[in-house]
Image (cartoon, grey):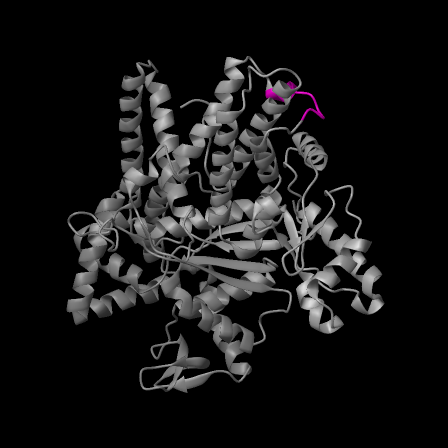
Amino acid sequence: MNATQEKLKIQLEQAIVAAFGADFAGIDPILVSASNPKFGDYQANVALSLSKKKGLQPRAIAGAIVDKLDVSEICEPPEIAGPGFINLKLKTAYLEAQLNKIQADPRLGVPAAKTPKREIVDFSSPNIAKEMHVGHLRSTIIGDAIARILDFLGHDVLRLNHVGDWGTQFGMLIAYLREVYPDALTTANALDIGDLVSFYRKAKLRFDADAAFQETARQEVVRLQAGAEDTLHAWKLLCEQSRREFQIIYELLDIKLTERGESFYNALLPKVVEDLDKSGLLVENQGAKCVFLEGFTNREGEPLPLIVQKSDGGYNYATTDLASLRYRIQQDEAKRIIYVTDAGQGNHFAQFFQVARKAGWIPDDVELVHVPFGLVLGEDGKKFKTRSGDTVRLRDLLDEAVSRAYGDLKTRLQKEERQETEEFINEVARVVGISAVKYADLSQNRTSNYIFSYDKMLDLKGNTAPYMLYVYARIQGISRKGDINFKELGNNAVLLQHETELALAKYLLQLDEVISSVEQDLLPNRLCEYLFELSQKFNQFYDRCPILQAEEAQRTSRLVLCDLTARTLKLGLSLLGIQVLERM
């Protein structure tokens, strides 16, 4: 109800001026949602803050404001409570009119952004020649949800996959494969991803232990950077092999990304160093070219440098990130750049953001945001790993969730003595399994660690995806049972009489506030909390109010409430990347 709150705020501001004069124009009425629903829907706390300024008791100030306040179209007569709170309760007729209005709106009352911007969301970002694992789960899911919400609001969103596809590791891998499996460097699909990962590990062990091999690997990097045809061909094959495996996971998760790896910016790196030098920021330290940072020190308390060119002439992540940042501002013309990575990289982002600002590369109208997230933990409270202690492959994690959802559904069908086709069971298991994993992640405050539990995330009760999918399916069941076409329900049909109808109505009208808050704070768990609370309020309404058996016009009104709830759930879940089911 952003629009409602804005109207009330304007009326309060006008009442303050009418009561105390033009000197008080622009005073914030401090309008917030009521702390307790029994006192109303909103409360203005401005009287307390004006008390000293006016030398009056807050209740006297509140009274003077209320005398000049006209909110009769929206609210019941305002009430003054406690030391001087102005309580406002929305009229039932106003709520009915708002619901009737959004019923015909495919956006359910959520306005598009007034000033759409070019926004970049940098997320997922796996490394070539390595499998995606549980560590990529949060970046991929959180980044996708943020991108979906910004896109829905009308922003021009570029979803970038900044894959690790350049550097020493490729020289190391190519040098090793030349010795043990040369066909992999000339023939497409000679290796599957599992073999490639195994060879990578062996190459790393060899690199760490063998000085001669280290030199060979470095020479391969030089050849790669110089564009040697055979090395470049080998590199492309390795990248394509990994890319195919990533795509399987992205399709499972319904993730769409534009790949732009580290290699994309390779030609831009010398210019980064050159321009930092011209700006007077570059300092040579032990042969390396660095920028010293404010607020960062080493263990000895000395200023910490950010290395942009190593003593051997090579570049590192910071150089690439600076080059990519400049490209995104200058070429992509982004106004907000959002990086979704684990919290452990917080210092890295703070450091290269600082360097870019010192160099004058960040215009005033460009916002840089690091969106950090915590770890995925096992039920033992430690980093989530396999029983053998290995990192959990993301493909295995998703397959296991679908498999468990399949088993749960088969058990439920047996208990209910229901017969369903194998096609139906497989589709429901896929949607429930993938949705459960996504929602379990997104429903946590992203800055916190969370415990990964298949049992909890697949539970049909509680704050889980299956619970909300079930509420949506229940509403579609009402439609089927009553042979109702929700699209044909009349306009201006909502009549709110029961307390659970009013509670549900008010909550349905808060979707725009919630999505607006996620746009600003980039915390998808706020949308999850809203959808869970909405589902609970619908179930309370469903339990206490007859729907198909109600008399007209109450029956149609309640069907409209059902439809609006289902559409809100479907829209909200879609913004989290979660598909709904008509039947479960």
Residue 246 falls left or right of residue 264: left
In the rendering, at what x and y percent does residue 344 appear?
Answer: 36, 64
Nearer the observer, 167 or 114: 114
The part of the chain drawn in magenta is 486-494
Nearer the observer, 534 or 477: 534
**Is 93 rendered above or below residue 339?**
above
- The residue depicted at 21 percent of the width and 46 percent of the height is 195
Q: Can I make out residue 570 in this image?
A: yes
Residue 425 falls left or right of residue 523: left
Q: Quadrant of residue 372?
A: bottom left
In the rendering, at what x and y percent does residue 400 appear?
Answer: 27, 37
Q: Main secondary structure of the magenta part?
A: loop
> Residue 81 in magenta?
no
- The residue depicted at 56 percent of the width and 26 percent of the height is 562
**Is 37 rendered above or below residue 343?**
above
Pick the quarter of the image with the N terminus. Answer: top right
**Is 448 rendered above or below residue 190?**
below
> Residue 490 in magenta?
yes
Residue 81 falls left or right of residue 438: right
In the rendering, at what x and y percent does residue 346 appear?
Answer: 41, 66
**Is 563 rendered above or below residue 318?**
above
- How many tags in the picture? 0
Nearer the observer, 403 or 38: 38
Q: Can I make out residue 271 in this image?
A: no
Residue 69 falls left or right of residue 384: right
Nearer the observer, 448 or 157: 448
- The residue depicted at 72 percent of the width and 26 percent of the height is 492
In the rendering, at what x and y percent does residue 2 appear?
Answer: 66, 48
